[in-house]
Amino acid sequence: MARQDTTNTMNGAEAMVRMLEAHGVRHVFGLCGDTSLPFYDALYRLDHDIKHILTRDERSAAYMADGYARVTGKPGVCEGPSGGGATYILPGLVEANESSIPILAVTSDVGTRSKGHYPLTELDQEGLMRPLTKFNAVIQHADSIPDTVRTAFRKMTTGRPGAAHLGLPIDVQRGEADPETIWADPNHQTYPAYPAGPDPDAIAAATDAILSARFPVVIVGGGVLLARGEAAFQRFVETLDIAAATTISGQGTLPETHPNCIGVVGSNGGVPATREIVQAADLVVFIGCRAGSVTTELWRYPAKGTR
């Protein structure tokens, strides 16, 4: 477990900065609002390795965190102020969560004791984020920050990765936290934290189906890229000498110049030649992708009767 050097006292905003640092965060994307001032003050005063990148608005912050996570293999972090800031950060969270990308959005919030009394920028941020994130919490006490941040990183990076949201009320940022609770599990600094293995029986059944097929085709998506499985996938198609199409997000799984790569399939980037090959297959295997409307062009193929 990675622990940080601490002092005898610490407020909630400082605890948040230290917990992000403990989890290996080196870049935070966002912009300030009045309820975010204690957090920005902690970023300014403390000695740490986090670089804050000021964005045009919260939408940009979330999308930048998403891109950062895809490129680095580490959770991306964005932040924004309460109210309108939370609503602007939402589109990027939806995209990341649906694409299995771990990003953490930290939104500051009005004080816990002013809730329900119509303070400026009050919004039910927890309710707003609930259906669109893998983990969602508004922290009520400063001493809960370390454990809640650990939970967020664990949820984001294990199982199917996804987005998390933490609400940080302004009075919680000013509250007192225990420096001794500042630590992180290093396994949750990258994703997937614990790569899942396939069901052996399912693998055996898929192998039998491929070997018995006359003309099998594989459609591979971004899930293989997220699992860092490009090399294994290339060995798979070469060993079986099987044709492989990619979804638009699966590009890069197999080099476009590879003899087994037949290009992008589907209504988003697909070409007629690839479609014809997939339509001619008697077995289509989807790996790391969904058989959704884009990949199948509104479920027009694989053709009826194709396995």
Image: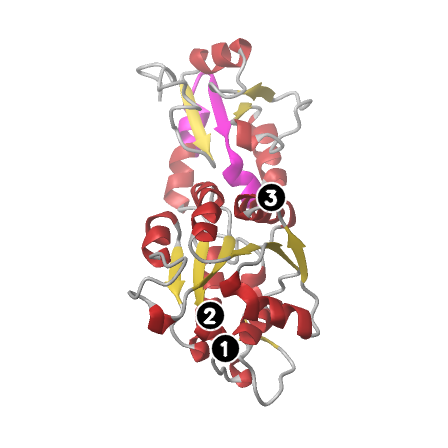
Q: Nearer the viewer, mark 3 or mark 1?
A: 1
Residue 161 in view, yes or no: no
Is residue 208 covered in magenta?
yes
Q: Position of residue 108 (x, y in %)?
A: 47, 62
Q: Amino acid at mark 2?
A: Ile
The amino acid marked with disc number 1 is Arg
Q: Secondary structure at mark 3?
A: helix
- Mark pair 2, 3: CA separation: 29 Å
Residue denoted by label 1: 174
Give the image location of residue 76, x and y in percent.
57, 53
Residue at figure coordinates x 54%, y 20% from the top left: 269
Q: On the image, numbered disc 3 is attached to which residue?
A: 67
Q: Quadrant of the C terminus?
A: top left
Residue 50, image x and y in percent?
67, 64
The residue that appears at 62% across and 70% down in the rendered structure is: 41
Near-viewer residue (59 or 289): 59
